Amino acid sequence: TDPFLGNPQNTIAVLQKYHFNFQKKFGQNFLIDTHVLDKIIRAAEITKDDFVLEIGPGIGTMTQYLAQAAREVVAVEIDKALIPILQDTLSGFPNAEVIHDDILKVDIAGLAEQRNGGRPIKVVANLPYYITTPIIMSLFESQVPLASVTVMVQKEVAERMQAGPGSKDYGALSLAVQYYAEPYIAANVPPNCFMPRPNVGSAVIRLTRHEVPPVQVDNEKLMFQIIRASFNQRRKTLVNGLNNSPEITITKEQITEAVESLGKGAGVRGEALTLEEFAGLANKINEMLA
Ligand code: SAM
């Protein structure tokens, strides 16, 4: 009678009907809290014009909410055992389609082209935590036209994505995410909102893609090499961190000169630098390499 999942009773009923066994290796923690589902949909700012890609629909709980809010939803699920369940739970939602595949192997740009005329799509997911970072980075680094990515992730990961210089959470992930998008943590979600309960706290974060990059970078690859090198050795100065990196091939004197050009002294640490300063440093080192 009530087609909506999203509460413990209906979820348990579906799991029992299909004798479903949770698979740890797929990071399966299903949402059982309607307030959290409402919050995710609101944070994603979905309208009836939107094409939404959902990653890992599980038994289709959030997919039902997305289908109500969006024009069209495509949900990609890796676990074969969930496919017949999804056919059942989504039977009343003709604008929701399920693809059985590994999201890391799906041609998302092609999907956006075919289904959304190449216009920016919205990605919404309660992500499997074992591949959060590869999924998010591949979305941003690929040619997928993206409006926003609204995802449930481990709380610590959300905090790292949103952190700025001077925070203990600030690092390569903060800079990578903020180069591509504006982060906003929309909700903190405790373990009891899931079945089974995860061992960690979770948070919903929306990453709104920048239309124009916030900094001008001549060589993106080099900038990210510099960022990784400077956070790989957090306790070292930036000069030493870069000098120890096999990828940065200029001399220590040149590195010192480039770092000093930021006006922060040669003893500065990477964690004190803003994205703008990393961009400036990368442009300077790129010139030296030319
Ligand atoms: N969206 C559902 C919910 O909120 O109740 C399920 C979320 S659960 C945290 C993550 C889902 O992602 C699981 O259904 C899991 O099987 C699926 N999954 C895991 N790895 C995947 C991958 N590589 N590609 C697609 N789906 C994946």
Image (spheres, rainbow, N blue to C red):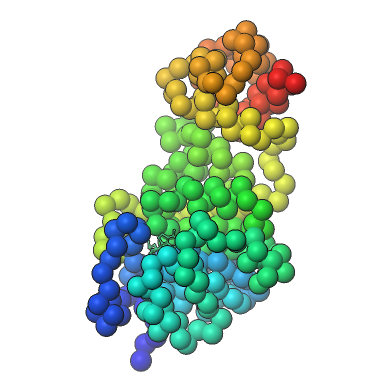
Left or right: residue 7 compared with residue 272: left
Image quadrant assignment for residue 259 = top right
- Front residue of this view, candidates 211 and 220: 220
Task: Give how far across and how far down residue 43 sits, in percent.
Answer: 52, 62
Name the residue located 46 percent from the left edge and 77 percent from the top edge: 64
Question: From this viewpoint, is residue 86 visible?
Answer: yes
Image quadrant assignment for residue 197 = bottom left
Residue placed furthest toward the top: 253
Task: Give how far across and how far down residue 220 sits, in percent.
Answer: 66, 35
Task: Give how far across and how far down residue 24 sits, in percent.
Answer: 29, 58
Q: Is residue 253 above or below residue 262?
A: above
Q: Is residue 133 above or below residue 17?
A: above
- Front residue of this view, candidates 25 and 198: 25
Task: Give how far across and how far down residue 90 sits, in percent.
Answer: 45, 82
Question: From this viewpoint, is residue 188 visible?
Answer: no
Name the residue located 54 percent from the left edge and 15 percent from the top edge: 243
Left or right: residue 200 compared with residue 237: left
How many numbered circles does the render carry?
0
Tell me the quadrant of the picture where the N terminus can be found: bottom left
Left or right: residue 185 compared with residue 226: left
Image quadrant assignment for residue 290 = top right
Name the residue located 26 percent from the left edge and 52 percent from the top edge: 199
- Front residue of this view, candidates 77 and 7: 77
Which quadrant of the frame does ligand 1 lie within?
bottom left
Name the residue located 55 percent from the left edge and 66 percent from the top edge: 53
